[in-house]
């Protein structure tokens, strides 16, 4: 998809960690693992933010690196605060996202917006992106060769933003960032680590639309994220829902 976003660019199941880890700044690259730093918070590193994201977007260009490019309408890069402490990562654009060039604007995106607002944030306070930047035909699952081409750009986005916390929405985002093929229904709810940054795997909003009974589980995950951020003095602009 060729346009930039409308807002500033700004397997046995691994045991869940009983006490959520304190958020830390991005460290030097390391293999994702269970987060067990015991609540120690690293000194914050300077953020690269919008300038860094623009470099990544420029390098991505009119991407033709995989077989998805011929069928896309728009490249969907990311949206929100380029200096966000909290980043949400999904799997791939859908039809609405492909049409508008912005992630999470369809029905699943509307639910994600409500989830973010329930945490006390707006979409402008956080950053939202996907593993894939182009829509797979018919909204099929991302394929390994497509993920392999897009993943470096996702990692560079996260390196530019340097968030204090990542929420991985659904199995593809979690498996991509954690290198763990544990089913998301078992992976969710326990903090993990992505290159020194605490990561909470949770259920994708599209899954929650198909099974609304699981919304409570996702909300528990997001409350744990808020609690972990609060322990290092990061609070949402508005009071979160109970």
Image (cartoon, rainbow, N blue to C red):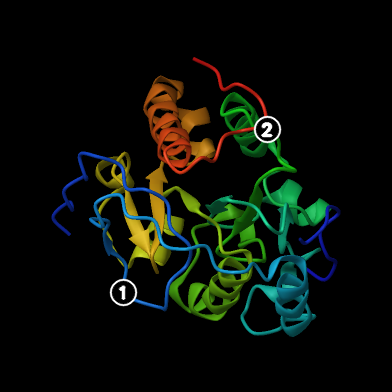
Residue nearest the viewer, comparing 219 with 81: 81
> Which residue corresponds to the image point at 23% horizontal and 55% vertical from the top-left?
36
The residue located at (56%, 29%) in the rendering is 119
Residue farthest toward the top in the current orientation of the protein: 242
Give the side of residue 103 with respect to residue 195, left or right.
right
Residue 28 location in percent, x, y? 42, 78
* Residue 89 versus residue 68 in the image, above or below: above
Judge the density around disc 2: few (<14), some (14-19), many (≥20) Cα neighbours within 10 Å: few
Can you tell which of label 2 and label 1 is closer to the viewer?
1
* Above/below status of 178 relative to 183: below
Q: Nearer the viewer, residue 45 or 199?
A: 45
Figure check: 225 above or below 132: above
Front residue of 212 and 19 = 19
* Residue located beneath label 1 in the image: 31
Residue at image point 60% right, 21% down? 239
**Residue 143 rendering spot, x and y as whole percentages:** 47, 69
Residues marked 2 and 1 touching at CB (< 8 Å): no
Q: Which mark is residue 110?
A: 2
């Amino acid at each position: 998809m060729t346009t930039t976003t409308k807002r500033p660019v700004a397997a046995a199941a691994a045991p869940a960690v009983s006490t959520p880890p304190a958020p830390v700044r991005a460290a030097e690259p390391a293999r994702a693992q269970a987060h067990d730093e015991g609540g120690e918070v690293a000194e914050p590193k300077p953020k690269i933010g919008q300038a860094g994201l623009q470099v990544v977007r420029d390098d991505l260009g009119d991407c033709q690196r995989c077989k998805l490019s011929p069928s896309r309408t728009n490249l969907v890069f990311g949206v929100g605060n380029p200096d966000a402490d909290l980043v949400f990562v999904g799997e791939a654009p859908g039809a609405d996202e492909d049409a508008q060039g912005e992630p999470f604007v369809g029905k699943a995106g509307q639910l994600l917006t409500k989830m973010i607002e329930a945490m006390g944030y707006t979409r402008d306070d956080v950053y939202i992106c996907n593993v894939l930047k182009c829509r797979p035909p018919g909204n099929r699952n991302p394929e390994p060769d497509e993920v392999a081409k897009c993943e470096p750009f996702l990692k560079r986005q996260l390196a530019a933003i340097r968030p204090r916390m990542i929420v991985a929405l659904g199995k593809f985002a979690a498996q991509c960032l954690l290198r763990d093929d544990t089913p998301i229904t078992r992976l969710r709810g326990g903090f993990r680590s992505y290159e020194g940054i605490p990561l909470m795997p949770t259920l994708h909003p599209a899954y929650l639309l198909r099974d609304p009974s699981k919304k409570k589980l996702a909300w528990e995950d997001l409350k744990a994220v808020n609690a972990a951020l609060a322990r290092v003095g990061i609070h949402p602009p508005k009071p979160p829902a109970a």
